[in-house]
Structures are given as structure tokens and as C-alpha cells.
Amino acid sequence: MPLNKLFVGVITAVMLMSPVAGAAGAVGPAPQAIDDPPTTGQPVEQSGDFINVTQSVDVWNSAPFTLRVDRSQNNAIATAVENMDTGARLDNLPPGVNADLGINRLVVHENAATIDLGFDPGDNLDNEQVHLISARIESTDTQVPSTTNIDTLRQFIRDNADSDDVTFDNVSSQQVTNGGADFTINNAEPGSYLYMAVVTNSGQGLNVDNNGDITVPGNVSVVGVDSAIVQETASTLSVQRASETYAAGDSVTFDVNANLGSSDIEHAVAIWNESQVASEDLTLVAPSDIDADTTPDEFEIEHSIDEVNGVQRTKDDVSAFGRTLTSNKRSGVYALPDVITFLANEGEFSEPQTDSVGDSRINASVTSKQAGSDTTLTVDTLENFAPGEYVAVHVAMVEGDPTRMSSNRVDFEVIDGISSGSNSVDDGRTNVQLTGDGNVRNVSVRLPSDSGVKNVSVTESSSPTGGAPIPNNSVATYLDISGDSSVSEDTEVTVTISQSRLDEVGIATENAVLLHYVDGAWKQLDTDATPTNGDVRLTATSSGLSPFAVAESSTTDEEDDDSSGG
């Protein structure tokens, strides 16, 4: 799968249609029919249907489900995200074959990884000798064929047998025993790979020469297919806000570095609620008859997600790792078929049919652009984004070269913000005015002289931020106060809150204090409370920034670590 497939995979993990990229097919102009007329192959004895792709190569209809790359966390995985529960429905599957798309987890492997593959043909092929063939794609001009689009597989075999952009390798062969066989690839080089499990039907089968070119002097059947991506190195990815907390509606800015030693880089950052996506279902429904003329729009995608809520932004007509995405921005709530249409039409992707069988709404956004190695990308959230833990995934590639790619992920929190604001720091001081429907007017911060903080952001929230529990104290409001770099030294914080809010929750002015969540516990700070023009100004010194609360003083100076309140 070339890196454009990873890019689509990242987007479609966000847009919740990974099988469109990973299984429903490579797209674009339909390839020319092969010159040789189709002939009926002579496959080894097994059940199921076979589809002829060349005079000497047939594909088993179970091939998309039998060969699987090990995508577990323990197998040299560089970047991984949990995907939906994905499956497929296909007529005429032979006994024992599990119609699993194998993409419940989307992964990128480390450079020089050991990649394990398992071959499970069900109740078929016992005692047969199976060859593992790898095809390493070295240019985005070459598309890895879809496992269910026979036409693209035929074109791939026909056009790339001796291509300079594809290197084949006859990795090893194993005998199928007790319903399966295992393969191992050592020291995998960076690149995008197609793996094929192949059995010989007649003649000499296939040959791979020292140049990585493949010939098929005999007759063979492809009985398993899967793909993998191996990156050159890890990219650097971080959110600009040290607390890694943002209010719904904020724009999240990421500092990224591809670490690829080039100034011509394609970048993409996508954000979504990973755990929510992982709880959804998606099924790829194949047409009743798959043959060399089958196209992606003949497949149907059944999904439990009815709507995607977010912003999709592409800039500078960036080539999305092999496919051109026109400059575009779209935001708001729209149905999943509309997302697929957005990518299918503006992004030149073929469009499968979709059928919503649920009513879930997923929050997800993506931004892509072409830039230097070290840059920033801003991804928008919307005010109706549900609070919770979100994942951000960065993928980068030197333009046109899938052997030169990097990736990384970072988690951050989206909170239900009441009001927010930010301001630059001048001589260690800043005063942040909050706008919105909150109860805090402004927050002043005096930082250590050597803090290095250039900007401070403040968000008022109705619930604790940063993973903090609810304290035992009576609370008027919560605050996330964050710099663009972390601070752990003494910092003076002044919060101006409305007197009416303190009265509403029954906190007397003289009992109002600031709480700071640090080292896994709420700390009650020594607070000076001063009434002023209908407000109360609370000043205290904390050991750094991040989660705060305006609360009623307790009889103890420190809350328990497992404080959960009531």
C-alpha cells in the first residue's frame, strides 16, 4: 500500500471509511484491458471461486481474507490507531474463511522492522506449498492494487513485472499444515508493500530475478493478499499548548517536523475521538459477482455512523501522497456519504455506495499542506465537538517517494469550554481577557523570568481538565491555564470571578480559594481574596500552570490523590 493509501487511511479513519482506501479499491481512470485474452486457469484443488487476471495468474475470491500482517503493538509498530470493527460480506466464500478486513487497527511499521504474517485459508490448501511474494513500491506513480478490485490487480501484475518503481521478492515458502502457515520478513526497508500468498498450479510457477523483476512461466493462483507500510523514521509532533487541552471550537495548532532531510514535504494531520470510532462498525458488502470489470462503485459500505462533524481543509493543491486534493475547506455536520463524496469528487476518489445502519455522530477534522520539513499545521474543531480524549496523527512524505515517509501520533483533550482567551507574554507578565458565557472576567499570570513562555491561553470549563477528578470542595468553576511551553516553577496567578457566581454556589468571599491540580492531587493554594466592583479577585502562587479551580476552602491543605468528590 503506497503512502497515498496511508494518507487516505488516516483521513478515512477520521472519516470512518477505511475500507474505501484499504479494501474497496484503488481508483482513478480505468486501466486498459490486458492485451492477452483471459483464459481459465487450473488452480489447485480447493473450494471457492477463481478470477482470471492474466493468462497465467488467477486470484482466489478468499484472497482478501487469508493473509494477514501482524498489527499487534508488540510487532515493531511505529504508529498505530484503533479503527472501527470492520468486516465484509462476500458470496461463495469457502468453508473456514473468516471475512475480516484485517484493518481494525491501522499501523505503520518501524524502519528495519520484523514483520510477521499469518496465512489462514480455513479448511483448504492443506499440504500445499505457499510462496510469500512481496512487492515494494518506490514511487507514488505506481498504485498498489486493491484486494477486491481485480482490474487494478491485473494492471499491477501486467504493468509492473519489470517496473523500475516496483521490486519483487520471493521471500520464502511454507507448507500449509493444520490449516495455516506463518511467514517472517526481517529488516524490512522503508516503503509501501503488497504481499501475496501464491500457489503453483502448473509448470514452473513464478520466478523473481536478481533485479527484482517477476515472470510467470507457469500458472499460479494468488490465494492471499495484504499490505504494509514501513516508515523511514518517526516524525516529531506536538501541540503548541503545554496542557494539551483545548475548548471545543478552538483551532489546534501542531508543531511538526518530518525528520526526513528534505524541504519538499507533504504533510497531513488528522484528529478524531479514537475510542468512539473504535466502538463503531463498518461492513464492506461486495457485489454478488466480482470479475475483472468490477469497480469500487459496485461495492456498498454499511456503517453505524450517520454523520461526521468537523472541518476538512486541504491547501495548495497538495498531492495527497499520490492523489491530488484540490484546495478546499468544508466544515459542519454532514452525512458520511457526503464525506465520501467530498473525497471522491474534489479529491478524485472513486465513490462507493454507502448505507447508514446507525445514528452515531463522530467529531473529526483534517488538514494537509505542502511545506518544508519543520512547519505548523492548524486543525479546526467545532463548538459542538464532544469533550473527551482525541488523537492526532501526522504523516509526512518526501514528494513522490513512498520510501521516504514518517509518522507519529499525540493525544490531547477537548473540553466543553464556557469562555476562553489568550494573550502574549511581555516581560514575564500577561493579562488574558476571557470572552463567552463564563463567570471569569480575566486571568493575570506572572511567570518566572526564564520560563520561555511566549503565550498563555485560558479556558473556563464546567468540568475538570487534564484528567483531574472532581475535588471534594464546593467548586464555582474550573480553569485550564496553559503556556506554549511547560512551567514547573512558582507562578503567580490572579483570577477575577463574578461575585454573583460565588453567591450562586454558596461560597463566601473570605472562603474562596484557588485549587491547583499537580502531581495527581488537588492542592489548595494560599489565596488572597479581594472584592472589587461586583467581582472577586483571587491571587495565589502555584507550582506551574494547567488545571485550576475556584472553590471553597476546605479544612485541609491538600486533597487526597483519589479525590472524586460528589
Image (spheres, helix red, strand yellow):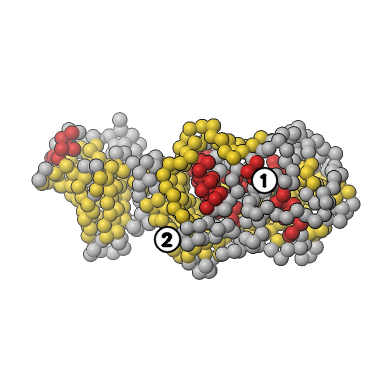
Compared to residue 126, the image places residue 265 above or below, namely below
Image coordinates for residue 31, horizontal then vertical, percent = 70, 54
Q: Is residue 397 left or right of residue 196?
A: left
Badge 2 crowding class, 10 Å Cα cut-off, few under 14, some 14 to 19, many 20 or more, is many
Q: Residue flagged by tag 1: what amino acid is it?
A: Thr
Q: Nearer the viewer, residue 268 or 158?
A: 158
Report the residue that reaches farthest toward the right: 203
Q: Quick check: can you spot residue 328? A: yes
Q: Is residue 200 left or right of residue 167?
A: right
Image coordinates for residue 315, horizontal then vertical, percent = 46, 59
**Disc 1 vs disc 2: which is toward the camera?**
1
Q: Residue at x 73, y 63 (%)?
A: 163
Instruction: Identify the mark at residue 295; answer none if there is no mark.
Output: 1
Mark 1 or 2, nearer chain start: 1
Q: Nearer the viewer, residue 94 or 140?
A: 140
Q: Residue flagged by tag 2: what amino acid is it?
A: Thr
Report the residue that reaches farthest toward the top: 566
User: Label 1 vs label 2: CA separation?
Assistant: 38 Å
Instruction: Identify the mark at residue 489; answer none if there is no mark.
Output: none
Mark 2: secondary structure: strand
Image coordinates for residue 536, horizontal then vertical, percent = 14, 44
Q: Which residue is drawn at 33% across and 34% down?
A: 564
Mark 1: secondary structure: loop
- Is the C terminus in the top left, top right, bottom left or bottom right quadrant? top left
Residue designated by label 2: 376
Image coordinates for residue 197, horizontal then vertical, percent = 75, 48
